[in-house]
Image: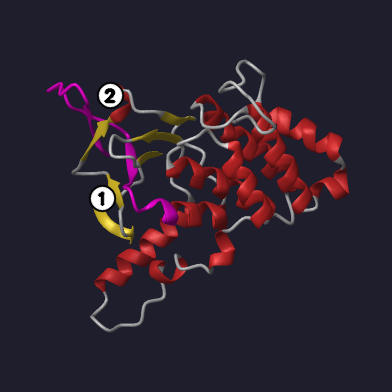
């Protein structure tokens, strides 16, 4: 369980029933690879002052602090550690979803990595470092969709947002079953990016239609079905995001 320290330096530290996956700058590729392989994370995510991410999970019994266990620049804040509440400092809340449990696959990888660290030097590794070396093609969206993402996002958007958008789209493009559920779930994940002002709802809808065409969903179910699912995922139109201009929302 992590000790939460408000950014204002309040001395009244509080022990909370959560852990934090701390993604520092340089660890975004690991996160994108994970989400491309196992689906987007549905839990609270907060940007940090240094440009990284704090991903919150319910405390898992036995979880401890670690540095670089899963991958370089990917740390865990848990029992015996502390975490700064960067949202108190005005950093962006990227996902305001309820704090969820640790994903089962991530716990498996943590177990493998812990075992690997305990093995004698030279013992063959079968765990995390092998898992997180996918081929380049495994985490790339098709070229035409990549360039459309570049045109669709707000100018000077931080790189982590671009990687997040590409990661979500790659999950959808590579889906061969459960495509309707995936489209709805990924649409929901885009809500926070729209709210953060890095991409408009109209552009998200267009990208999701393209991804649904590429994975065969529209060919099987039709465009109308895809649009209904996208609207369900994105939710009511309470704001459009940034002001649009031009074909894809930006000059």
Q: Residue at x 63, y 38 (%)?
A: 185
List the single residue furthest toward the front. Answer: 251
Q: Which residue is mark 1?
A: 64
Residue at the extreme left of the image, as rendered: 11
Residue 38 sits in quarter: bottom right
Q: Is residue 76 left or right of residue 108?
A: left
Q: Kindly give the residue lying farthest to the top in the view shown.
A: 238
| Rendering coords of residue 85 (x, y %) | 28, 29
Q: Which residues are magenta?
A: 1-30
The quadrant of the picture occupied by the C terminus is: top right
Residue carrying label 2:
89
Q: Residues within 10 Å of mark 2 (few under 14, many from 20)?
A: few
| Crowding near the residue tagged with mark 1, few <14, some 14–19, many ≥20 C-alpha atoms within 10 Å | some
Image quarter in which the N terminus is found: top left
Q: Is residue 198 left or right of residue 118?
A: right
Element type where label 2 sits in the image:
helix
Between residues 2 and 196, which one lies in front from this camera angle?
A: 196
Mark 2 against mark 1, which lies toward the viewer?
A: 2
Q: Nearer the viewer, residue 237 or 150?
A: 150
Q: Position of residue 47 (x, y in %)?
A: 37, 35
Mark 2 or 1, nearer chain start: 1
Q: In the rendered view, tell whether residue 134 sits above or below residue 126.
A: above
């Amino acid at each position: 369980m992590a000790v939460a320290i408000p950014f204002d330096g309040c001395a009244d530290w509080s022990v909370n029933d959560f852990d934090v996956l701390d993604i520092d700058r340089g660890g975004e590729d690991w996160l994108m690879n994970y989400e491309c392989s196992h689906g987007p994370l549905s839990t609270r995510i907060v940007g940090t002052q240094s440009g990284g991410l704090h991903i919150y999970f319910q405390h898992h019994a036995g979880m401890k602090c670690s540095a670089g266990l899963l991958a370089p620049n990917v740390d865990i804040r848990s029992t015996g550690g502390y975490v700064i509440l960067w949202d108190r400092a005005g950093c962006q809340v990227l996902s305001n979803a309820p704090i969820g449990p640790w994903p089962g696959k991530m716990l498996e990888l943590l177990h493998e990595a812990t075992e690997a660290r305990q093995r004698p030097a030279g013992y063959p590794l079968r765990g995390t470092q092998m898992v997180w070396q996918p081929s380049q093609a495994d985490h790339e969206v098709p070229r035409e969709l990549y360039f459309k993402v570049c045109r669709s996002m707000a100018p000077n958007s931080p790189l982590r947002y671009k990687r997040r958008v590409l990661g979500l789209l790659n999950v959808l493009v590579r889906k061969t079953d459960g495509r309707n559920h995936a489209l709805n779930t990924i649409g929901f994940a885009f809500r926070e990016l729209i709210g953060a002002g890095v991409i408009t709802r109209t552009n998200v809808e267009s990208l999701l239609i393209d991804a649904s065409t590429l994975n065969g969903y529209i060919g099987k179910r039709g465009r109308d079905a895809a649009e209904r699912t996208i609207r369900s995922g994105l939710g009511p139109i309470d704001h459009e995001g940034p002001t649009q201009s031009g074909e894809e929302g930006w000059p």
